[in-house]
Image (tube, grey):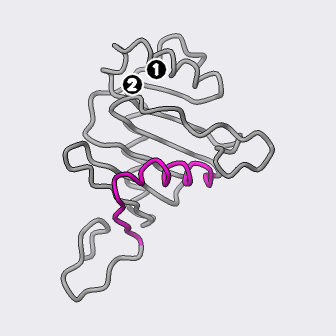
Amino acid sequence: MNVPWTVPEPGQPADPNVTFLDPDQLTAVSHSLAAASRSDWMTMDERVLGQLPPRGNGTGDPASIPREVRVRSLYDMTCMKDSAAMDQLLSCTRTGQEIRFTEPGAMTLRIADRDALLIQASPPERTTVLIRDPQTVTFWRTIFDVMWSHAMPLPGSPS
């Protein structure tokens, strides 16, 4: 059985559904996936890293998340102690982003629809993998949805 995130044995072909990325590519690939999303963009982060790409403004800007896409983000509960991060997250909810908090995780996760999954392990490893295997993406979507259902909503948010 070829598990989608394993490195192939020497002489074996690489899995076309898995791409190992340079850790510094996370933001660029993440923004591209977000802009290509059609229905869902889901993220999980240990800390507030920065603003998401803007919502679509009707200009077809490829760096923007389409308005019809549901954006949900899970953050580590320790983010709640950072007032600047909380202000930034409240600002994001005004554009329709849904935010909740969960127990500390050990990775950064991005899921675009049912098409792609981007995972980055926490430092010091920072291994970054783009996965397009449908079963693996579905598996991680399920994990995200379960975590979402148990997570605490952002205090003061409209949702």
Q: Which residues are magenta?
A: 17-37
Residue at screen point 42% across, 54% down: 25
Determine which quarter of the picture holds residue 143: top left
Secondary structure found at label 1? strand
**Residue 144, position as x, y percentages in the image:** 40, 42
Which of 123/133 is in front? 123
Residue position for label 1? 153
Would you say the magenta stretch is mainly helix, strand or loop? helix
Looking at the image, residue 8 lies above or below residue 59? below
Determine which quarter of the picture holds residue 147: top left
Q: Dot 2: few (<14), some (14–19), or many (≥20) neighbours within 10 Å?
A: many
Looking at the image, residue 99 lies above or below residue 57? above
Residue at screen point 27% across, 69% down: 3
Residue position for label 2? 101
Secondary structure found at label 2? strand
Q: Are marks 1 and 2 in contact (CB under 8 Å)?
A: yes
Q: Amino acid at mark 1?
A: Pro
**Residue 9, position as x, y percentages in the image:** 19, 81
